[in-house]
Amino acid sequence: MTFSTFPSRRMRRLRSHDALRDMVAENHLSTNDLIYPIFILPGSNQREAVPSMPGVFRQSVDLWLKELDKLVASGIRTYAPFPVTPAELKTDCASEAFNPEGLVQTAIRQIKARFDNVIIMSDVALDPFTSHGQDGLIDSNGYVLNDDTVAVLQQQALSHAEAGADMVAPSDMMDGRIGAIRNTLEDAGHVNTCIMAYSAKYASAYYGPFRDAVGSAGNIKGGNKKSYQMDPANSDEAIHEIVMDLQEGADMVMVKPGMPYLDIVRRCKQELKVPTFAYQVSGEFAMHQAAFANGWLSKEAVILESLLAFKRAGADGILTYFAPDAAELLNR
Ligand SMILES: NCc1[nH]cc(CCC(=O)O)c1CC(=O)O
Ligand SMILES: [Mg+2]
């Protein structure tokens, strides 16, 4: 290889005009790519800020319904509700997780009743409902019990499907839960309920602000989730996790966190060619917002660049707290 193609080939030619650049752009971001996580408070007319997530509010369902009028009109069609469970409803056995009248089940029913063209992706995991903050049931040493937890996750996923969830999204990282949930859904006749598996979910320190938002931060017994979420050191293991979840019946898979793990997104898409999603998590959101607030980064350009990076890595969609901002920017 020599440089002899110059000047017949000048890479800058295709960068010389906006329309040309757009014509040859290899990747595109659109509102179809956005999934918006929303935090649900009990009651009505309730709205609270999340201090570590500036711009994110926890709201009761009635207020979310009003806000969704605007968000849906802006083109965001997929929502991921997370409950802010009152402390008195949290127990060791997490039975609030499958209460048909629970916060998430109610939110699903009300949102689906109001919007024909909206998809709900509901989180399946026990951490919002356990008094100890772990994603599953624990033994006397605090160890999270796999199979006992899966049995509760099956009931939780079924209660979401019965409420009308289009997609259940197990984020708990128990072994075997995708197959168990798939069987439960099939047996109950929910043959078209999708499973979005959080297959490669890492034991990450970037989830801190989310735990503030759902009120599970202070009380994680044992202090971490390393006995079930993946070690950030690992890459091949992520592919094994993803393949197992696909074999058990996942329709779509997720990598989480997002930006620090784009290499995993890339490998998943390149090696398996399956619907691949990523979560730009609360800590990623918080650090961007901090830089914007300080004037260190330019908000609008960086939001779109950060999301386009997910597309370039191979993601088909992105869960992001920036969804409303991104939709607004994409519609300009
Ligand atoms: N099942 C829990 C769950 N579902 C989504 C997130 C994190 C999302 C974020 O940080 O934005 C977590 C946190 C955790 O595993 O502790
Ligand atoms: Mg797994």
Image (tube, helix red, strand yellow):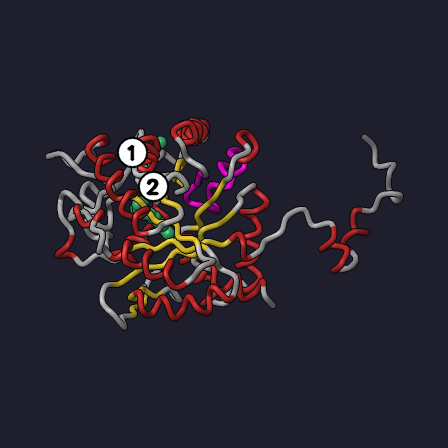
Q: Position of residue 19 (x, y in %)?
A: 75, 59
Q: Is residue 212 visible?
A: no
Q: Which residue lies most toward the front here?
A: 189
Identify whether 13 is placed above or below 240.
below
Q: Which residues are magenta?
A: 252-268
Q: Label for residue 170?
A: 2
Determine if the magenta segment contains residue 329: no
Determine which residue is flagged by label 1.
Answer: 174
Mark 1 secondary-structure assignment: loop
Where is 176 relative to 290, above or below?
above
Task: Give the image quarter of residue 118.
Answer: bottom left
Three-letter amino acid code of the residue under disc 2: Pro
Q: Amino acid at mark 1?
A: Met
Between 239 and 60, the residue placed more toward the observer is 60
Frontmost of labels 2 and 1 is 2
Q: Is residue 15 left or right of residue 61?
A: right
Residue beneath the point at 30% across and 52% down: 163
Q: Quadrant of the C terminus?
A: bottom right
Q: CA distance from mark 2 to mark 1?
A: 9 Å
Q: Residue at x 33, y 56 (%)?
A: 108
SS category of the residue bearing label 2:
strand
What is the quadrant of residue 298 in the picture?
A: bottom right
- Whether disc 1's CB lies below 8 Å from ligand 2 is answered yes
In this view, 66 is above or below 151: below
163 in relation to 144, above or below: below
